[in-house]
Image (cartoon, rainbow, N blue to C red):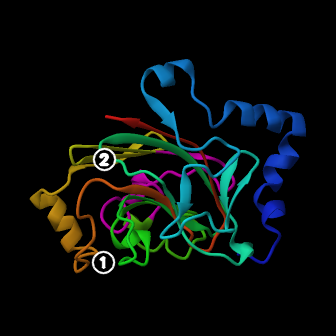
Amino acid sequence: MLKNLPVIAVFFAGALTACSSAKVTTENAVNNGLTKQESKDGWVSLFDGKTTNGWHTYNSDGVSQNWKVVDGALVMDPSSGAHGDIVTDKEYTDYELSVEWRISEAGNSGIIFNVKEDKAFSATYNTGLEMQVLDNIKAGDNKKENHLAGLLYDLSGTADLSKPKPVGEWNQARIVQKQGHLTLYFNGVKTFDMQQGTDEWKNLVANSKFKDWKNFDLTPSGKIAFQDHGHEVAFRNIKIKSL
């Protein structure tokens, strides 16, 4: 576990030893922005690489100290003493979301979507679906196949679809949701493709831990969240396009 070590030193040691400060600056100038073609195609950046603008801690007015911007990435720092998932200020319905993530050794987190923000719910996962973020090798939650990285958590997926990069490297995730049809991609591999609300979908829920959660996945819309699961995790190049 990494939480007893200095957060910045551990999490970014590989990146800092691999390149000079000048190179990091250049990388940050490229990351977290949009190409002319992306802008033309309707993509919008959800993270500017410098601030937490557009985000807040779930059921809170601001951003708690566990979420920081470090070297052009939105980082969850478990040594901060603060807790809470971070969510978008806005809600989204039909969209394509693209994001890169990097997890610490034995780390666990998630991209949670269709989140309903309300004081009646204590956590983002009470209402939202989750695309898993995980160190498949050393994380404690690696015993079930549909709990592995890039899969629709506890609902669908097999080990052969989960192909994360080695710990410390960036992974690419995409979530496409249009008129209730949900498709997930992880490092270029399609890991899920199904219409929500169908008998097949209801069967997935009925055979999951969420089967008796009356507020789970009520509608295919809501806020997007990054999970604080007590481990270091970083996100960058967070962008969305309305469909």
Vertical position of residue 129 compared to residue 93: above or below: below
Q: Residue at x 21, y 44 (%)?
A: 179
- Return the residue found at the far front: 61
Q: Residue at x 30, y 65 (%)?
A: 155
Which class describes the residues within 10 Å of circle 2: few (<14), some (14-19), or many (20+)?
A: some
Q: Does 214 sit left or right of 30 as displayed?
A: left
The span picked out in magenta is 148-173
Q: Residue at x 53, y 43 (%)?
A: 46
Residue to which mark 2 is pinned: 93
- Would residue 52 be seen by someone viewing this image from the given angle? yes
Vertical position of residue 202 compared to residue 121: above or below: above
Q: State the predominant SS element of the stretch in magenta.
A: loop
Q: Does 43 sit left or right of 93 as displayed?
A: right
Task: Choose between 164 and 71: the one closer to the eye.
Answer: 71
Residue to which mark 1 is pinned: 209
Mark 2 is on which residue type?
Thr
SS for dot 2: loop
Q: Does 7 sit left or right of 45 as displayed?
A: right
Answer whether residue 226 is magenta in the image: no
- Between disc 1 and disc 2, whose residue precedes? 2
Mark 1 is on which residue type?
Lys
Where is residue 146 drawn, in percent x and y? 37, 65
Checking the image for residue 91, the label placed there is none
Answer whether residue 166 is magenta in the image: yes
Quadrant of image for the C terminus: top left
Which class describes the residues within 10 Å of circle 1: few (<14), some (14-19), or many (20+)?
A: few
SS for dot 1: loop
Give the Cα separation between the discs numbered 1 and 2: 25 Å
